[in-house]
Amino acid sequence: MYDSLTRQNYKSYIFIPYNFGYHWILLILSVETGNLIVFDSMRNPKSAIQHILDPLNRVWKKIVKNNKGRGQWRPELNVNMDYPCARQQQGTDWCRYYVCDYLHIMTPCGKATDEDSRMSQMGGECYSTDRINAVCEQLAGFILNEILDPRGEFYHDSHIHRGLPLTS
């Protein structure tokens, strides 16, 4: 966890989709502010995800300690569980689609939008079947074009690289 977050500490936000007990949530870490925003369509209490918050906080403290000369970071994560997001209908398993949609909304694909306007799109309503189907289509297109296609930004040739890349 430490290595992964350290490699991304130059970014403004780090997106962490997380699954526990057959339920998906999205954690968004604002590196600059030390805020951790939790998008949970089932509105679980903080205690339900304490098992991931504790290790994240330990890792964050280590990152802050090793952050030499790159600004002032909050010494402990500020966890926000009350951020408005869509509410999952009781008896559905749509949480994974909500997480995909949150990711889509928060990564505007180069469009110039601010955080508040993107966040406001998440509202508190339940999603319609049509919107869930649209999320599925977008996700399938992303997987095909960006992950499976060798020209895609996130294509990986299945070789595992550990540590620093080799230079020739």
Image (cartoon, rainbow, N blue to C red):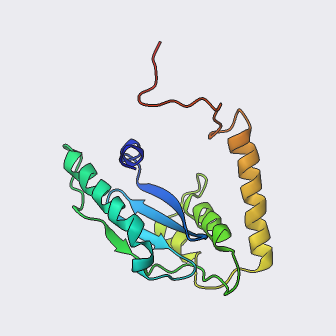
| Residue 33 is at least partly visible in this image | no
Taking depth in this image into account, of 51 and 84 the one nearest to the observer is 51
Residue 89: x, y in percent?
67, 85
Residue 91: x, y in percent?
70, 85
Outermost residue toward the top in this view: 168
What residue is rendered at 75% in x and 80% in y? 128
What residue is rendered at 31% in x and 62% in y? 57
Horizontal arrangement in the rendering, residue 46 relative to residue 96 (left or right): left
Horizontal arrangement in the rendering, residue 79 relative to residue 120 (left or right): left
Is 100 drawn above or below residue 80 in the view shown? above
Residue 168: x, y in percent?
47, 12
Taking depth in this image into account, of 93 and 116 the one nearest to the observer is 93
What residue is rendered at 68% in x and 68% in y? 97
Is 42 drawn above or below residue 62 in the view shown? below
Taking depth in this image into account, of 160 and 102 the one nearest to the observer is 160
| Residue 97 is at least partly visible in this image | yes
Residue 53: x, y in percent?
37, 67
Horizontal arrangement in the rendering, residue 10 relative to residue 151 (left or right): left
What residue is rendered at 20% in x and 50% in y? 65
- Looking at the image, how many numbered discs can be counted on the residues? 0
